[in-house]
Image (spheres, helix red, strand yellow):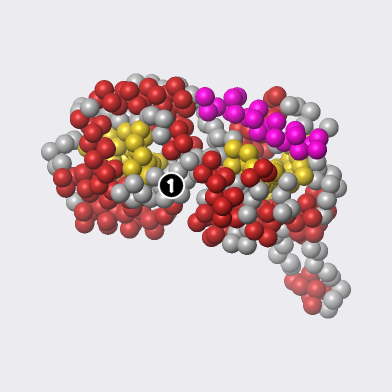
Amino acid sequence: MKKILFISHDASRTGAPIVLFHFLKWLKINQPEIQADLLVLKGGNLENDFKEVASNYFDYEIKTTQKRLNRKERILLKLGWLKKSNLKDNLFLELSQNNYDVVYANTIASIKLAFELVSKNNSAKFIAHLHELNAVIKLILPDFKNYVDRVDQFITPAKMVKANLVSNWGVPENKTAVVYEFALMYEIEKQNKKGEEFIIGASGTVHWRKGHDVFIQVARYMYQHHPAHNFKFIWVGQISKLEQVVIEEDLIKLGLKDKVIFVGEVENPENYYKDFDVFLMTSREDPFPLVCIEVGMMGKPIISFDKAVGTNEILEQGGGFIVPYLDIETMGNKVLEYYMNPDLISEHGAFNKTVFSKFTPELISPQLFSIIKKNCSA
């Protein structure tokens, strides 16, 4: 039986962990002979889901956090009669005894720990599935080049991610495979929006990378130049208390408080997505956002920025508009073009529904598994 240790930076309900969860679920059903263990660097709201699909589940944060010593233990420690155990070493020993065939780092944030593990088990193949572009790599692992030579196989979710690794980080092109991300298809009910509202949607954690500030500026531009039109802007996704207060004040000062809505994290975001007329992908960096697959499957046209998202590799064939990077005016004008031309919405939406419906766990997971299998037998 082949043994694989997957490493995730956390168990949050966000892009890379969600993709990993669906792949592990597919593995459990379709390749039950594989021992697929999972190490998460910290927990999150996918924990219970992960535990159901992983053969064994390890939480690095919990495993390496020293328990609080009682008074007696503190005295013994001070006298040198009690030694603190190295919990990280204990965890590494436990993992190394499993003799994994493959250690699979699922994001740039898990590379360093994966490197430490394979260094203790030279026979294990090292696969790095990187979902990040240049700025995020610089922020999270600026010395990434130091780890490149030890990696046996790189996987990226888009050609632009591969190109960045090859051009800027010295990753060999022949060691890098492109496998697009995937998402579940939702059963969509009828839209329930009010009257003639034209809803411009966006989604993602409120964070500089996702461009929520750009979304607000597009709304400002649209209402400034087309005040008579019944536009409504809705952003779905996790938002911190700090960001919420700042955004609310911005919207009040812009006179957009009732026109731009940040609904926060919701359990069923598809209930909002189905009412979108057009989707704005305002990210500054986003390798292959799952939300584009999800709204694409629903038949929604997408507007994104050039050089910013891997989804452009699909959109350049149809299904939306790619506008110059951070060009708020052009993005707003493309929204207006859709507003004035419902047939264009239908045309681009139909294209997206056809193309993105192929980006499912059932169709993409075998591609990932074939890469793992090749490395297991190498």
Q: Position of residue 156 (x, y in %)?
A: 59, 42
Percent of width and height locating residue 114: 71, 52
> Magenta includes 78?
no
User: Can you identify the residue that label 1 sits on?
Assistant: 308
Placement of the N terminus among the 4 image quadrants: top right
Span colored in magenta: 358-378
Q: Is residue 204 left or right of residue 22?
A: left
For badge 1, the amino acid type reads: Ala
Which of the 4 quarters of the picture holds residue 88? bottom right
Where does residue 312 sit, x and y in percent of width and height?
A: 43, 38
Residue at position x 47%, y 45% in the image:
286
- Residue at 71% across / 49% down in the picture? 151
Residue 106 shows in the view: no
Name the image quarter holding the C terminus.
top right
* 61 sits left or right of 270 in the view: right
Can residue 167 be seen from the camera position used here?
Answer: yes
How would you rate the neighbour count of disc 1 (Cα within 10 Å): few for under 14, some for 14-19, many for 20 or more? many
